[in-house]
Amino acid sequence: MPPKDNIEDVLYEEHPSMFRNRPIYFIVCCLLCAAFGIGLVMLLIWYIQTLGTTLIITEERTTLRRGVFSKYTNEVTHENVRNVQVAQTFLQRIMGVGNVGISSAGQSGVEIYVRGIPDPDRVRELIHEGSRGEFEPA
């Protein structure tokens, strides 16, 4: 019998959206770029923070990675997921982004919380499918 690979298929991997999550802040930063140049620094810091944040959903777990120079990783296996929260403001619904919170049976609060994730309803469905064991092995 061949050895089983421990590599999980990545079902979803996204960084938070900048413009779609906070369009007014984005426009203000652009205006500050033209007026004073400070908006460029604000956009650069925001861009680096966005690139340093990744939500990854595999068949078995959901992982949130944050950081560029120092790293923070939080991981919840789908079999332990107790609650998935999706919150969207009116503007976020129009833009197709939202905030996602994941709670597990091992903790009393939200373990993974990320803002501005594209297609948050798909994230919720993928996690629920994984917690019910509905993914077929490759």
Image: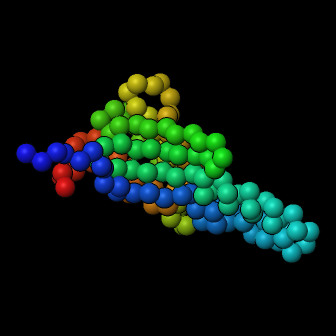
Q: Which residue lies furthest to the left in this view?
A: 1
Residue at (19%, 45%) from the top-left corner? 4
Q: The N terminus lies in which quarter of the figure? A: top left
Residue at (91%, 72%) from the top-left corner? 35
- Is residue 63 positioned above or below 91 on the image? above
x then y, percent, for residue 85: 46, 43
- Is residue 12 positioned above or below 101 on the image? below
Look at the image and tell me whether residue 128 can be seen. no
x then y, percent, for residue 28: 79, 66
**What is the quadrant of residue 24 in the picture?**
bottom right
- Is residue 18 positioned above or below 133 on the image? below
Q: The C terminus lies in which quarter of the figure? A: bottom left
**What is the quadrant of residue 39 in the picture?**
bottom right
Look at the image and tell me whether residue 64 can be seen. yes
Residue at (44%, 34%) from the top-left corner? 103
x then y, percent, for residue 82: 37, 33
Q: Which residue lies furthest to the front in this view?
A: 2
